Amino acid sequence: METKIVLDFIVAINEANVNKICDLMTTDHVFIDSQDNKTIGKDKMRQAWIGYFALFPDYKIEINEILEKGPLICMFGYASGTYKGLINEDNSNYWRIPAAWRAIVNDDLIKLWQVYADNIIVMDIINKNK
């Protein structure tokens, strides 16, 4: 059951469906990004996801492997996106990087979502387009 909830969360992310993402979060949801920055609360995360999809409207998560231990779900795969949807001839604003995610499910909702990824390529694309 926990894995299905996490997979539904990923589908919502891949659809950039902020309402569906938030519907799957606990009120006190905790998000930790790859730089170890923490955001707490569904309302703050609603704004964070809106902002993130403005930066990467085609953001996608691809999962290759899932490990489940009770409410803890760990996923491994790739994250990708195009900075502000700016598609150019050499596709240099697009990135795809290996990533991992850790989720904790509580009462059929995502209590914690943590991302592990080396975002150096992403930051280089953002800096190049400033």
Image (spheres, rainbow, N blue to C red):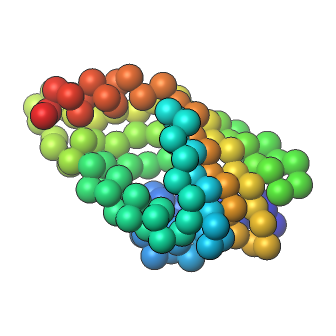
- Residue 126: x and y in percent read 23, 33
Give whichever of 63, 40 is nearer the camera: 40
The image quadrant where one finds the C terminus is: top left
- Name the quadrant containing residue 8: bottom right
Residue occupying the point 44% across, 49% down: 60
Give whichever of 125, 97 is nearer the camera: 125
Residue occupying the point 48% across, 25% down: 118
Q: Using residue 3 as the reference point, say whether residue 50 is left or right of it.
A: left
The image quadrant where one finds the N terminus is: bottom right
Above or below, 66 relative to 126: below
Count of number-bearing discs: 0
Whether residue 72 is visible, yes or no, is yes
Q: Using residue 125 as the reference point, say whether residue 24 is left or right of it.
A: right
Whether residue 16 is visible, yes or no, is no
- Name the quadrant containing residue 19: bottom left
- Name the quadrant containing residue 101: top right
Above or below, 101 relative to 13: above
- Residue 54: x and y in percent read 26, 56
Residue occupying the point 57% across, 52% down: 31
Q: Using residue 97 as the reference point, say whether residue 125 is left or right of it.
A: left
- Residue 71: x and y in percent read 83, 57
- Residue 3: x and y in percent read 75, 58
Residue occupying the point 38% across, 65% down: 47
